[in-house]
Amino acid sequence: MTIHTGRDIHAADVTPEDASIERTSIYVYEAPLRVWHWVTAVTITVLVVTGFFIGTPLPSVPGEASDSALMGTIRFIHFTAGYVLAIAWLLRIYWAVVGNHHSRQLFKLPFWRRDYWGGVLWEASWYAFMRTEPKKYVGHNPLAQFVMFTVFTLGMFFMIITGFALYAEGTGLDSWQYWLFGWVFDIFPNSQSVHTWHHLGMWAFVIYTILHVYAAVREDIMSRQSMISTMISGERMFKDNRDD
Ligand code: HEM
């Protein structure tokens, strides 16, 4: 049966009583960006768990010592995930150059635009439950952009640079890792200090992830536009009517 409601709906069980709802969808996140997002989500989870155990190793491991390389395995998984994170980040930077304009938002902070900061304050009051009607954005809202740039983007550079500097301590003075990242030890007073800051960075990422997931779920429900499915399909769907 076909119902004429402005658009033809071809469904076996549709009846004249079924209401049709008009939705507007905009294609925002292209496939490489979405793949990068989920690869990064998984690798950061692995890095946080393994990094936590590197910083707080198990007091003992049962069985014959020579039969087990538990901490070695944890470190190996950390380094592998570190490489995946860093290569994916390089590809993400490349995509910011060749992708659509939304792919560049993560790397930009419109610091000198007064209306941008007005938008940040407005969103802060929205997240604080002081507003009832959400503002809609095809990309990230100004507050999300601020947190993503200052915590995530700068944090990624910080974790990759300090991570590879620590790694270079193992690969040695004549390794490419030391050649590229050895300068980190000219800035920090010693290796322990790099460890401590790399470790603190982990907690920044843990807090960021909690807020990021909270905001995505909250906005999916409250802002009348899609969030989580947008990072799967790439499409932002706008729901306009309050009684939808
Ligand atoms: C979001 C990303 C990352 C997180 C959350 C993270 C977390 C951590 C943590 C918590 C530690 C323990 C620090 C300590 O207390 O001594 C650690 C150590 C380390 N991380 Fe990462 N890390 C990340 C990225 C990377 C990357 C990209 C690399 C590059 C390969 C890397 C390489 C290392 C190395 C070499 C160590 C020292 C291992 C040791 O001394 O046994 N990390 N990481």
Image (spheres, rainbow, N blue to C red):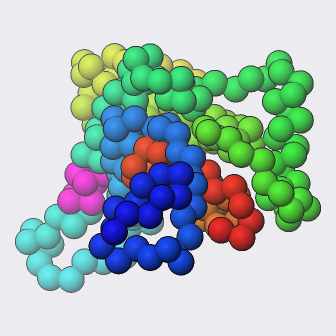
**207 left or right of 231 in image:** right
Picture residue at 57% right of the left edge, 61% below the top: 21
Image location of residue 111, percent across then percent down: 78, 23
Look at the magenta stretch and give its main secondary structure.
helix
User: On the picture, is 50 further left or further right than 225?
Assistant: left
Task: Write the start and end of the magenta stretch as one range.
Answer: 72-79
In the picture, measured across the screen, residue 88 lies left or right of residue 65, that is right
If the image is split into quadrants, where does the C terminus sit?
A: bottom right
Q: Is residue 200 left or right of residue 34?
A: right
Residue at 83%, 51% (x, y): give it: 124
Circle count: 0
Q: In the depicted view, which residue is nearer to us: 200 or 15?
A: 15
Q: Is residue 155 visible?
A: no
Asked if 232 appears above or below 165 in the picture, the reply is below
- Measuring 47% from the left and 38% from the top, which residue is drawn there? 27
Q: Is residue 202 above or below residue 36?
A: below
Residue closest to the eye, 212 or 183: 212
The image quadrant where one finds the N terminus is bottom left
Queried whether the magenta region covers residue 73, the answer comes back as yes
The reply to whether the magenta stretch includes residue 14 is no
Q: Is residue 236 above or below residue 222?
A: above
Percent x, y for residue 128?
85, 61
In the rendered image, is residue 92 in sight? yes
Residue appearing at x 21%, y 83% in the figure: 62
Observer-nearest of 244 and 95: 244
Name of the residue lying farthest toward the bottom: 62
> Residue 61 appears in which quarter of the rendering?
bottom left
Q: Residue furthest left?
A: 67
Q: Position of residue 133 (x, y in %)?
A: 83, 57
x and y percentages locating residue 40 in the rendered image: 39, 46
Near-viewer residue (119 or 59): 119
